Image (cartoon, rainbow, N blue to C red):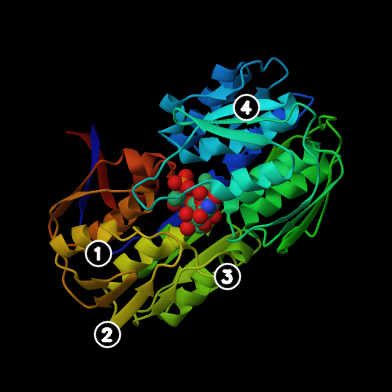
Amino acid sequence: MDYLQIKRVESLSGNIKISGAKNASLPLIAMTIVAKNSVHIKNLPHVADINTLLKLLSNLGATCEFCDDRVIVDTSSLTQTKATYDIVRTMRASILVLGPILARFGHCEVSLPGGCAIGQRPVDLHLKALEQMGAKINIEAGYIQATAPNGLRGCEIIFDKITVTGTANIVMAAALASGETTIINAAREPEVVQLCEILNASGAKIEGIGTAVLKIHGTNGELVDIKEFSVIPDRIEAGTYLCAGAITRSELTLTHVNAHHLGSVLSKLEDMGSTFSITEDTITIHPSKVIKSIKIVTQEYPAFPTDMQAQFLALATQAKGTSIIEEKLFENRFMHVSELQRMGANISLNGNVATINGGTKLSGTDVMATDLRASSALVLAGLVADGITNVHRIYHLDRGYDALEKKLEAVGANVKRLKE
Ligand SMILES: CC(=O)N[C@H]1[C@@H](OP(=O)(O)OP(=O)(O)OC[C@H]2O[C@@H](n3ccc(=O)[nH]c3=O)[C@H](O)[C@@H]2O)O[C@H](CO)[C@@H](O)[C@@H]1O
Ligand SMILES: C=C(OP(=O)(O)O)C(=O)O
C-alpha cells in the first residue's frame, strides 16, 4: 500500500494547475447513459473515482476510450442494468446511474451504497422521488430493484433535505420522463449547474438552473444528443491548495480555476487574514504571517462546503486564538481530529462542533487517513509539522486528488509517495 511522507517546509511558491472536478465529472459520466450519441468529455481529473465509474459503465456494456484527461463514452451498446456491490461499495456515487438507467430501460438494479466513514448517507430521497415519478422500488438482498415499465412521469418533488447526487439523479431521470418535473429544494452546487447546462445545450429543457427550484421538461424517452464539453475546475482541490498557501504562509497561484465557485472559501480565508488577486481563471493567495481564528458552519452551496471542513480545521490549528467549526452535513466527519491531536493539535470535540485552540506546534508522526478530505487535512498539517509525517491509507486521497504529491512538490514541498 502507498503512503505519503511529508517533511516540514519553510515556504512554497509557484503555480498549481487545478484539475477538472471529481464531483462534476461523476454525474456527467453517468449522464452519457441518456445520450443517443458517443460523448466526448474533456478535463477529467486522474482520480480513482473516475476509473471506478468508467469501469462500472464498461461492465454494463458501454465503451469508454480514456486518453490523458479525455474520455469518449458510448452507451449505445449498454445492455446490462445491474450495478453490482463490488463496484458500488468502493464508490457511493455509483448511485448516479440509477436515475438514467431506469429512465432509459424501465428497470435497474443498484447495490445499496450503505454508510461510509463520514456518515450514514442514506439514499431514501433519491428513491422516494423516483417512486413519485411512477417507479416501483423494492429493496432485496442489499439491492435497489427499480422498475418503471411504462416510463417515468414528471411530477412535483420536494426534497426534505438538499441532496447533491439526489438532485443530479432526478434531473437525469426527469430529462427522459414524460411531462414536467419540478424539483423543490434542489441542490445549487456548481456541479449540478454544469450537469443541467450540458443537458440544456443538448436539447433538454431545464429552467431555474442554479436556483432551488428546477423545472425539467421531459423528452418522453427520446435520448438527447450531447455535445462535447469540458468539466469545470475542482473547487475543493483549489480550496485545499489555498489552505496549503495559508498554512505555510506562502504565495501560490492557482491556474485553471473558477473563483466564482469559491466564494465562501475565499471569504473565510480572508477572515483568517489572507488576501487574493483574482483573474478570470487564476487565484493568487497572499497569506498573512498571523493566521486569525475563525468560526465556520458547513452548509449547502453557496455556504461553506463540508468538503473543505477538514482542511480548514488543519489550518485552524495554526491560527492565533480559538476557532469553532460546526459540521452540519455529515454526523461522523471529524475522524481527522484524533489524528491531528496525535500530531499535537489542541482540539476538543463536542458532538458536531470542534473547538480548536490554535497556535500549537505540530510534530510529525505516522497518521491514518480516514476519508478523502481527512487525508488532505493531514497532508496540510504535515507541511508545517516538525520532523516527518507519514500519511497512511492514501487510497482515500487517490479517490479525489489528481497527482497531489506532484503538484505540491512542484511548488517546493517535500512530499513523497512511498510503499509500506
Ligand atoms: C459525488 C459527490 O458529489 N459527492 C458530494 C455530494 O455527496 P452526496 O450527494 O452523497 O451528499 P448529499 O448532498 O446527498 O447529502 C447531504 C445530506 O443529505 C443526507 N441525505 C442525502 C440523500 C438522501 O437520500 N437522504 C439523506 O438523508 C445525507 O446523509 C447528508 O446528510 O454532496 C456532499 C455534500 O455537499 C459532498 O460532501 C460530497 O462530496
Ligand atoms: C465526500 C466526498 O465524496 P463522495 O461523496 O464521493 O464520498 C468528497 O468529495 O469529499
Q: Is residue 114 left or right of residue 184?
A: left
Q: Is residue 34 left or right of residue 217?
A: left
Please determine whether, in this image, residue 400 is positioned above or below residue 40.
below
Say what secondary structure mark 4 lies in: strand
List the residue tagged with mark 3: 263
Specify the label residue 321 is tagged with. 2
List the residue tagged with mark 1: 10
**Residue 74, percent across and down?**
69, 21
List the residue tagged with mark 4: 108
CB of mark 2 near ligand 2 (< 8 Å): no
Mark 1 residue crowding within 10 angstroms, few (<14) / some (14–19) / many (20+):
few
Q: Is residue 88 visible?
A: yes
What kind of residue is marked 3?
Answer: Gly
Please determine whether, in this image, residue 54 is positioned above or below residue 360.
above
Q: Is residue 162 left or right of residue 298?
A: right
**Residue 291, percent across and down?**
33, 79
